[in-house]
Amino acid sequence: MNDIRSRATLEDVAALAKVSTATVSRFLNNPGALTASTAERVREAVEAIDYVPNLLAGGLASKRSRIIATLVPSIAESIFNDTIEAMVGALTEDGYMPLLGLTKSNDAHMGELIDTILARQAEALILTGQLTDVFTRERLRRVQITVIETWGLPDDPIDVAVGFSHRAVGEEIARFILDRGYRRPFLVVPDSQRSGLRRSGFVDVWNAAGGAKVTELSMPVPSCFSQGRLVFRRMLEMQRRPDVVICGSDMLAQAIMIEASAAGLRIPDDLAVIGFGNLAVAAAMRPTMTTIDVDGTRIGREAVALLRRRAAGNESESRSIDVGFRIIARESA
Amino acid sequence: MNDIRSRATLEDVAALAKVSTATVSRFLNNPGALTASTAERVREAVEAIDYVPNLLAGGLASKRSRIIATLVPSIAESIFNDTIEAMVGALTEDGYMPLLGLTKSNDAHMGELIDTILARQAEALILTGQLTDVFTRERLRRVQITVIETWGLPDDPIDVAVGFSHRAVGEEIARFILDRGYRRPFLVVPDSQRSGLRRSGFVDVWNAAGGAKVTELSMPVPSCFSQGRLVFRRMLEMQRRPDVVICGSDMLAQAIMIEASAAGLRIPDDLAVIGFGNLAVAAAMRPTMTTIDVDGTRIGREAVALLRRRAAGNESESRSIDVGFRIIARESA
DNA sequence: CTGAAAGCGCTTACAG
DNA sequence: CTGAAAGCGCTTACAG
């Protein structure tokens, strides 16, 4: 076989197949352009020599890296998992290499990641978490790269967005709560822009309906179980005990449900709980959890479909795609 | 500013700074090699022109891609999350770009992913899930690339491994169970090589101790909540009801605990439950979950440390690093 | 310390 | 349909 240290190159294949490197390159990228017999000769050579193309060189020459970068706040933050799985699947099918970057919801870190991504000549950048830093947003606008923001619908998308209105989620929850007759809502708001939007949506509708003052507590992101425990303890100390707690994530809701049950409270009679995300655990809990469902898979698919349209030269289209959301009313509220 | 379509190149910087491209390249990769004044001139040019290096070209020329690929079965499979976070963090610090590939525990898919990874000239490949396909293992051995297998300690590592003995986990659980006086264990075994090893470790110790025949049930991977429900229903139908169920994952254990509680069983008196993974939920549950803890962060760090030693030319070292594991005895067993 | 020049392994007009 | 050749944007001995 070929030497182990230096891998076989196009030239090796060409020599073996007795054709030019151009022909081998065409075989690899556009086999239809060759005669059947030439193609067969090249195919045999590729196989015999166990040839693996160098995509670094290919990308440099063609000016198409076939890399798509996706930025996620964290991989444990499983709310984005469906979106990521769907995207990775579809991109791989299209011959792209999905690059996953972890931002830890840190704007500075995000800036560095974006540098690397640009340096790697990524053709598109997909954001799942919110990028708030204005300078980085401006920078991305200047660069020649497709940017898809997902899971939100910013007023001023960097390029295009696929998501839903977080404000509308808050409004919808407020209506749901009012409808069911709850009177003393408690909002647990993760410290992120999107949670803030859901919060204001809720508060606006609630106040407009003449509801009593909303109690709130803000939480650092990412949320974890111990926060849920903390929140529950805080609630017990409140003089006017809430009748429903609206959480920024299913995980927080789960933690509160566990604590409440352990403390002997009945859900939803003594305390109703609403989550966000509709993770698998929401349906599995007892009682089952009322929460907000977002079609993450669809977000992923729409993002890739958008990329495909761009690749096909379809530049002019709407800046944002709203995939909506649903309240999943279960037992906990 | 520079043209938006075609980005600035080294040559542009060199022209502006009135130096050769070689000097700019040195400034970028080894600034110490320049006079302070030259360095300053170059720095200004880089800044003025908003230069972002093309790492495709850089990698091709230097034959160092600075890409490290990590293969994970799925991002929802959160057992590997700590490992991944630790690795991604450390690699990014070292100036590497971590490439995350999702294998879906599918050997065929894994083969294709590895092709892409080799084509991208990755310098190392880190596996979290088990790669069972013998051909692919052989192929990786032939190729000039560092392969680190994590979370397991194969008898015949492709290259090096950082993990622990799954068989030892099974043995330890058997001893734990015997110690606590349980008599009718029920093993829920995910359909994977590693689970199989834990299973045999358990069965060997159990049988050696003269325990009654072990009841078992195998489950497709990845495990999900609905499987837990199914397993619990099966258990109820068994004539000789188990007194302890040993699960292949915390998620399965969690689902069974929820179902058992809902059915009025007391844990651990009526049914003890043991998980695997020690995810955050294990400590948060009520009752808290007894499970196996593995230091995933350490696995990630050791993997990167290994890479660093390799980069420093340290080829000859042991083929495997055992990070061990611990049984976390909580309330559920 | 700095520069001229060759070369990394591909792709792609261009010509035939 | 196929090939010769230029070029993608870097790095790195080599010489000075």
Image: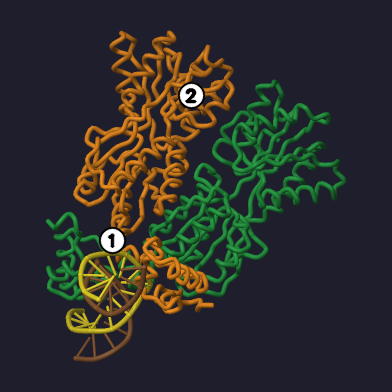
Chain colours: A green, B orange, C brown, D yellow
Nearest the eye: A8 or A139: A139
Whether residue A91 is visible here, answered yes or no, is yes
The residue to which callout 2 is attached is B232
- Chain hosting mark 1: B
Nearest the eye: A259 or B247: A259
Q: Amino acid at mark 1?
A: Lys
Instruction: Please say if B229 is above or below B81.
Output: above
Q: Residues within 10 Å of mark 1 (few under 14, many from 20)?
A: few
Residue at left offset 41%, top offset 48%: B91
Q: Earlier in the sequence, mark 1 or mark 2?
A: 1
Q: Amino acid at mark 2?
A: Phe
Mark 1–mark 2 distance (CA, rounded to whole Å): 55 Å
Residue B3 location (% of width, % of height): 50, 79
Residue at left offset 50%, top offset 48%: A82
Q: Residue A179 is drawn in which quadrant?
A: top right
Of circles 1 and 2, the one toward us is: 1
For this view, does A116 lie left or right of residue A264?
left
Q: Residue furthest right?
A: A210
Instruction: Please say if B74 is above or below A9.
Output: above
* Total count of labels: 2
Say which mark, if any, is on residue B63.
1
Residue A150 location (% of width, % of height): 57, 57
Query: Same chain for the residues at labels 1 and 2, yes or no?
Result: yes
Q: Residue B14 is drawn in which quadrant?
A: bottom left
Residue A60 location (% of width, % of height): 34, 70
Nearest the eye: A232 or B220: A232
Residue B72 location (% of width, % of height): 39, 44
Q: Residue B267 is drawn in which quadrant?
A: top right
Whether residue A23 is visible here, answered yes or no, is no
Say which mark, if any, is on residue A274.
none
